[in-house]
Amino acid sequence: MRYRAATVRERSFRNNDMRVLHLDLGREMRGGQWQTLRLVRGLREQGHEAVLLARFDGSFRLSRLPAQRRGCDIVHTHDARGHTLAALLPGGPPLVVARRVAFPVRQGPASRWKYARAAHFVAVSEFVRARLREAGVNDERISVVCDGVEVPDEIAPPGDPPRILALANADPGKGGALVREAARRAGVTVHFTRDLERDIRGAAMLLYLTDEEGLGSAALVALASAVPVVASRVGGLPEAVEDGVTGILVENAADSVAAAIRRLVEAPGEARGMGLAGRERVAARFTTAIMVEKTLAVYRKVLS
């Protein structure tokens, strides 16, 4: 196996192509899964061989993992379950682990062993990088690669009456009850969406309320369409939403959220300016192309 891995790396440097195995065992398509899919597509568009192992109809065939891993330059895991499975397999190519969540890393012996197995960590934000540092991961093993989204060629003006969106999510930590109460106090109707990229066109604002967040790719999707975001001041969200410039950061309290909603509804010019500023910021810092290039830089660093 050592001989095969070395041969694959030599081929990669010579031909500037790589074979990367991606592992994502998420049970539904959420922000992290969309990012994995965008990364795989971006790598393939650049001529690299990217293979994605994921759940099918809620199940995952573990027996496929060892065979798919052979001949790879890199194994890149995108969730905790995938990290655990890849860490348990002996030998093989270097393991790159994406860390997208905001909560602290567990400190038990099993967790410390698992985190020691990774060659490198890809943190979705500076906030998440700090969480990894707290867990004892050296800076040399951490790179920040933010989420990437597509920036539409055209944007639609807000409709009349203004349409306010929030994400449909049954997770109690994702702010659904807070959104409803804040909307009641502000005297507005909120539309809960399960397809943000479809519904964001022509929206007046996105409410992104949560107890914790690694970065907030949904906020970036909204800003890319020039839609301002009212977001919780938690985790990595302040890195995605610039307070007073591309949206409004709020405390997780109904009065605070309601005041932000009223401000954007009553000042449509200000809201439009925030959306346009957000679109420019996403185009400069948070596109899919930038995310793919920074991930490739991580792979090259690991293989060097």
Image: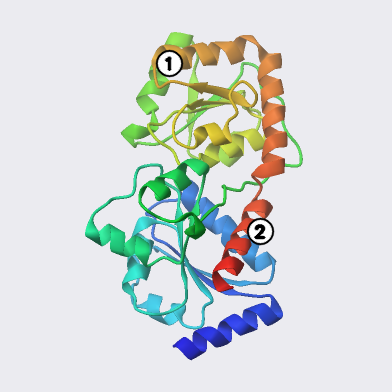
Exactly how many numbered labels are in the figure? Answer: 2
Please report the residue visible at 42 percent of the width from the left and 49 percent of the height from the top.
133
Please report the residue visible at 34 percent of the width from the left and 33 percent of the height from the top.
173
Residue 191: image x %, image y %? 49, 26
Please report the residue visible at 73 percent of the width from the left and 35 percent of the height from the top.
280
Q: Residues within 10 Å of mark 2 (few under 14, many from 20)?
A: some
**Res. 143 image quadrant:** bottom right
Does 284 appear above or below 258?
below
Gap between marks 1 and 2, in whole Å?
Answer: 40 Å
Q: Residue 293: which disc?
A: 2
Q: Nearer the viewer, mark 1 or mark 2?
A: 2
* Residue indicated by mark 1: 182
**Res. 46 image quadrant:** bottom right
Please state which of residues 186 and 228 is positioned toward the viewer in this rendering.
Answer: 228
Please tell me whether mark 1 sits on a helix, a strand or a loop.
helix
Q: Residue 90: which disc?
A: none
Circle 1: residue type: Ala
Please tell me whether mark 2 sits on a helix, a strand or a loop.
helix
The answer to whether one can see residue 151 in this image is: no
Q: Residues within 10 Å of mark 1 (few under 14, many from 20)?
A: many
Q: Are marks 1 and 2 in contact (CB under 8 Å)?
A: no
Q: Left or right: where does residue 172 sit relative to residue 51?
A: left
Does 249 appear above or below 288?
above
